[in-house]
Image: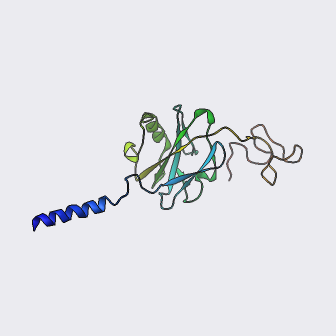
Amino acid sequence: MRRWTGLLAVAALCGAACDGKKSTDRPTRAQLRKTGAATVEVIPSDGQLPYCMLYTVSEKGVIRQLTLTRENRSIRCDANKPVAHTSFRIPVQEGKVRLYIFFSDDRIPAGPVAQQLYELRGQERINAMDLRLPGRVFVETLEFTPEEGGTAVTGTVVGAGGEPAPEGTGVPVLSDGGTEGGLGAMDEAP
């Protein structure tokens, strides 16, 4: 009788743990939406922690913080909306990048995260247990390879259809890429 009970317990445990799914079959916390040859949006999935930070680590070893703010902390990231309501341009010359998205339950400082990424740059995969961060933190790693193509136009007036307007038909463009009376390249909306 004891033998059957033990065998049934093992079968029940195996059935619960071995349901045919691989350990990598977990829901993704974010997805990439390619918006151009070298631009991408990061879209958090439903049910994620409310704050996030984005970093890229290129094949050449360059680490970039994509969500840089004045306070240098993580930002609010709403589900199903692009992070920072923007697309991020990935430099083609740096090759394929890994995007690290750090979701947290509180705003965390970005400096220590960047330092730890630098220390772990040779590691194949990075997870939340590798980092020394306060609170609950989840890490999603995605890959993106930028491609040559598209025509980048900076410092020009954009017409109603999103195309550059003919010269002399719009607002004067300043040397910083902004417009007279408008937002410059480094200015923020109120």
- In the rendered image, residue 26, in percent from the top left (x then y), is placed at 42, 56
Q: Is residue 135 above or below residue 61?
A: below
Task: Identify which residue, 19 or 186, lies in the foreground.
Answer: 19
Residue sitting at the far top:
60
Q: Quadrant of the N terminus?
A: bottom left
Task: Identify which residue, 179 or 150, lies in the foreground.
Answer: 150
**Residue at x 74%, y 38% (from the top left corner):** 176
**Residue at x 43%, y 51% (from the top left corner):** 138
**Residue at x 65%, y 49% (from the top left corner):** 35
Task: Identify which residue, 124 or 18, lies in the foreground.
Answer: 18
Residue 32 visible in the displayed image: yes
Answer with left or right where residue 2 lies relative to residue 11: left
Q: Quadrant of residue 80?
A: bottom right
Residue sitting at the far left:
1
Answer with left or right where residue 77 lies relative to residue 3: right
Task: Identify which residue, 24 or 123, lies in the foreground.
Answer: 24
Q: In this view, does 105 lie above or below 97?
A: below
Q: In this view, does 95 lie above or below 66?
A: above
Residue sitting at the far bottom:
1
Answer with left or right where residue 35 lies relative to residue 114: right
- In the rendered image, residue 3, in percent from the top left (x then y), is placed at 12, 63
Residue 73 visible in the displayed image: no
- In the rendered image, residue 60, in percent from the top left (x then y), is placed at 53, 31
- In the rendered image, residue 47, in percent from the top left (x then y), is placed at 48, 61
Q: Quadrant of residue 186?
A: top right
Callout count = 0
Answer with left or right where residue 13 lies relative to residue 90: left
**Residue at x 57%, y 43% (from the top left corner):** 66
Q: Quadrant of residue 15?
A: bottom left
* Color style of the picture: rainbow
